[in-house]
Image: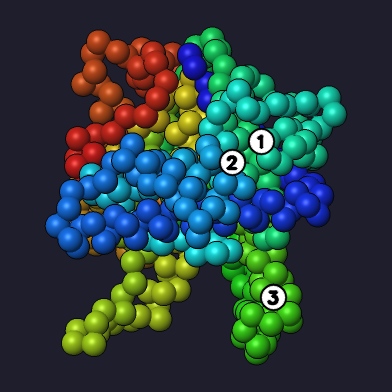
């Protein structure tokens, strides 16, 4: 199968290269915003949507215009790719997959991409990469880059520049060595509860944001006291960004290790198709209809977002494919209120956060383990309908299709 993978490294540019990096990122941001403004003006005038090809002609005109001739100093391919990003953002909006495109702000997500592999040279022996109009860039070579280079993305994060090298290579279709099927229940008190039909595994939450919340709040208060855009304000802002980057790095490291271990040890992964954006939506309401328990809901939202459920699901998705496993997303409704023994579903079954007591048969168990068991059974029942693509597992009678990938139930797919 074809395996696409990105390798991210921190680069060590010279002073001149840093100036060019900021200049190129600013040029791509300018092109994106100018094209977005043109699209909005055209829409207000009653015109049709301007496609990428027509917008690329506008880019040529901007580069030849005296007022914006400085765009010629930046490589043209990253500028064109900025227009492709805007076109993709519009397509996602039309398909109701995302909100309306917004203007980019300086210092937030500064990045640009070299999409042509013919213009990129990678010298791993000397730990450097060649990019047009930047020359050779030194990078911290922490691991080998495998495969053919397809594109390179340069990004700025917390004052440091990084290169993300995307590669592509053919690998043999993996066959998972484990026959186990596992149900995964995500939560706040327990980050994940796993049930494979024989034993329970609990992953404690890391709570990366909660650990650094007071330190971050102190740095943000110090930043608020500085004169905006002054030298001390920029220093305080850099301190806030470093703390935020540390929080993100610790969370990402935890999620990568957990998702790798789970996908390596289980051939079938059953997860809930959670809508994290809806679950973490604010409860403040409006002036006419104010919400209730706003502070409590805000704390719950912070705890949910601190766990990184969406990123964890994304990592399980591609890592299960790499390992030859199968990821199944099932409906999350009543997973912790349904008795795994008799099937009775009632809100009173879950008496507390951790206690489950069936009102019909009297079965008592941990509520998170009950949810994991139900998620696993739902995933197995979902695959039982695929008679043409299932393999019986020797250990626990689970079934899984012979090809890796992700599968959703019809109910879960409709909710997306």
Q: Is residue 26 above or below residue 254?
A: below
Q: For mark 1, what is the residue?
A: 132
Mark 1 and mark 2 residues within 8 Å of each other at the beta carbon: yes
Q: Which residue occupies the foreground of this view, 291 or 51?
A: 51
Nearer-N-terminus badge (1/2) = 2
The residue at the point 52 percent across, 21 percent down is 3
Within 10 Å of the Cα at label 1, are there few (<14), some (14-19), or many (20+) other Cα atoms? Answer: some
Q: Choose between 143 and 137: the one closer to the eye.
A: 137
| Alpha-carbon span between mark 2 and mark 3 | 29 Å
**Mark 1 or mark 3: which comes first in sequence?**
1
The tag on residue 75 is 2
Camera-side mark, 2 or 3:
2
Q: Where is residue 226 in the image (x, y as percent from the top left)?
A: 67, 87
- Looking at the image, can residue 76 be seen? yes
Q: Which residue lies furthest to the front in this view?
A: 66
Quarter occupied by residue 377: top left
Q: Image check: 155 left or right of 397? A: right
């Amino acid at each position: 199968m074809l395996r696409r993978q990105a390798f991210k490294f921190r680069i060590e540019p010279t002073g001149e290269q840093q100036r060019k990096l900021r200049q190129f990122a600013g040029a791509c941001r300018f092109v994106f915003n100018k094209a977005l403004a043109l699209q909005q003006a055209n829409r207000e005038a009653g015109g049709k949507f301007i496609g990428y090809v027509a917008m690329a002609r506008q880019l040529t005109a901007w580069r030849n215009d005296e007022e914006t001739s400085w765009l010629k100093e930046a490589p043209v391919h990253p500028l064109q790719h900025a227009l492709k990003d805007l076109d993709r953002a519009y397509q996602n909006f039309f398909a109701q997959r995302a909100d309306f495109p917004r203007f980019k702000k300086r210092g937030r997500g500064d990045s640009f991409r070299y999409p042509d592999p013919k213009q990129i040279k990678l010298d791993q022996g000397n730990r450097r990469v060649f990019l047009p109009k930047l020359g050779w860039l030194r990078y911290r070579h922490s691991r080998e880059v495998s495969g053919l280079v397809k594109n390179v993305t340069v990004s700025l994060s917390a004052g440091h520049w990084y290169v993300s090298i995307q590669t592509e290579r053919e690998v043999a279709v993996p066959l998972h060595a484990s026959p186990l099927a596992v149900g995964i229940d995500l939560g706040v008190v327990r980050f994940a509860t796993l049930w494979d039909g024989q034993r329970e595994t609990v992953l404690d939450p890391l709570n990366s944001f909660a650990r650094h919340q007071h330190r971050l709040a102190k740095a943000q208060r110090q930043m608020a006291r500085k004169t905006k855009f002054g030298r001390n304000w920029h220093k305080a802002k850099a301190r806030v960004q470093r703390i935020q980057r540390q929080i993100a790095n610790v969370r990402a490291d935890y999620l990568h290790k957990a998702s790798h271990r789970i996908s390596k040890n289980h051939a079938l992964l059953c997860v809930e198709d959670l809508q994290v954006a809806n679950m973490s939506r604010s409860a403040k309401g409006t002036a006419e209809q104010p919400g209730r328990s706003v502070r409590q809901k805000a704390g719950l939202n912070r705890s949910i977002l601190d766990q990184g459920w969406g990123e964890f699901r994304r990592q399980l998705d591609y890592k299960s494919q790499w390992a030859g496993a199968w990821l199944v997303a099932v409906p999350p409704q009543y997973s912790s209120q349904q008795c795994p023994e008799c099937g009775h579903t009632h809100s009173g079954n879950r008496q507390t956060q951790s206690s489950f007591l069936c009102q019909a048969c009297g079965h008592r168990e941990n509520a998170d383990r009950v949810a994991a068991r139900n998620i696993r059974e739902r995933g197995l029942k979902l695959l039982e309908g695929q008679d043409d693509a299932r393999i019986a597992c020797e250990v626990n009678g689970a079934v899984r299709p012979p090809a890796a990938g992700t599968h959703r139930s019809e109910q879960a797919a409709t909710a997306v």
